[in-house]
Image (tube, rainbow, N blue to C red):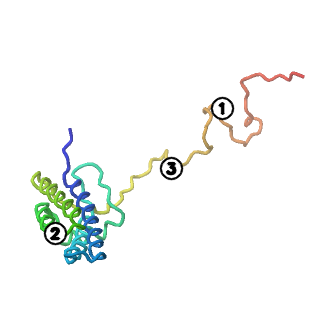
Amino acid sequence: MGKIEWAMWANEQALASGLILLTGGIVGVAGQFRGWEFAAYSVAAGVFVCLLEYPRGKRAKGTSVERTGQYCFTVCVKAFGPLTRNYYVRAFLHAAICVPGGFMLATVLGCVCLGIASLIYLAAAIRGEHWEPILPRKEVRKPVAESIKNPPQNPPPRPPPEMRRKQAKDLESAAYDNPISVTADE
């Protein structure tokens, strides 16, 4: 059975929790709830978490599908080096970010989700996983075989080779030979 890549799950969980934290913060600030300062903090924390978690990491094996427009975020996250590559750092960073969100009802859900993402990142770090960027690959074109260079001359469905139309250089030999006898019944 295959090995579970916990970092992939943690990335999805953290991105969703960043969006939830951002939404809860906007609701708290717009409603001017008591302690709306925590909501303003949650807006900033949600944006930070979304920017940090938007680029997916490369999987250990298999296909790594990048998100749309991820390259510019990947360059920014990669620039911080071991701070963003190490999942122990991400686990403790997310745990620290989620604490102030627990003091306001509008941001509690985002706080709990980010705490769960922090635990999943900790599990990934304990299993030795680390973040590697998905960089664009240079496409290496294989040389085309001789038989593939020329496209087929007649569209499908193609008759068997013995039934194909002959070249029209000689009209007499280009005619079809009908294997079934045809008689006029009049």
Where residue 149 is drawn, which disc sits there?
A: 3
Left or right: 140 with respect to 93? right
Task: Count residues near mark 1 (Cα–Cα under 10 Å), then give few for <14, some for 14-19, many for 20+.
Answer: few
Where residue 46 is drawn, which disc sits there?
A: none
Q: Earlier in the sequence, mark 1 or mark 3?
A: 3
Mark 1 secondary-structure assignment: helix
Residue 149: x %, y % from top left = 50, 50
Disc 1 and disc 3: Cα gap in Å? 24 Å
Residue receiving disc 2: 103
The three-letter amino acid code for the residue at tag 2 is Phe
Mark 3 secondary-structure assignment: helix
Mark 2 secondary-structure assignment: helix
Where residue 163 is drawn, which disc sits there?
A: 1
Task: Count residues near mark 2 (Cα–Cα under 10 Å), then give few for <14, some for 14-19, many for 20+.
Answer: some
Residue 9: x %, y % from top left = 23, 53
Residue with the most extreme right position: 186
Which corner quadrant of the image does residue 99 belong to?
Answer: bottom left
Residue situated in front as seen by the camera: 186 or 59: 59
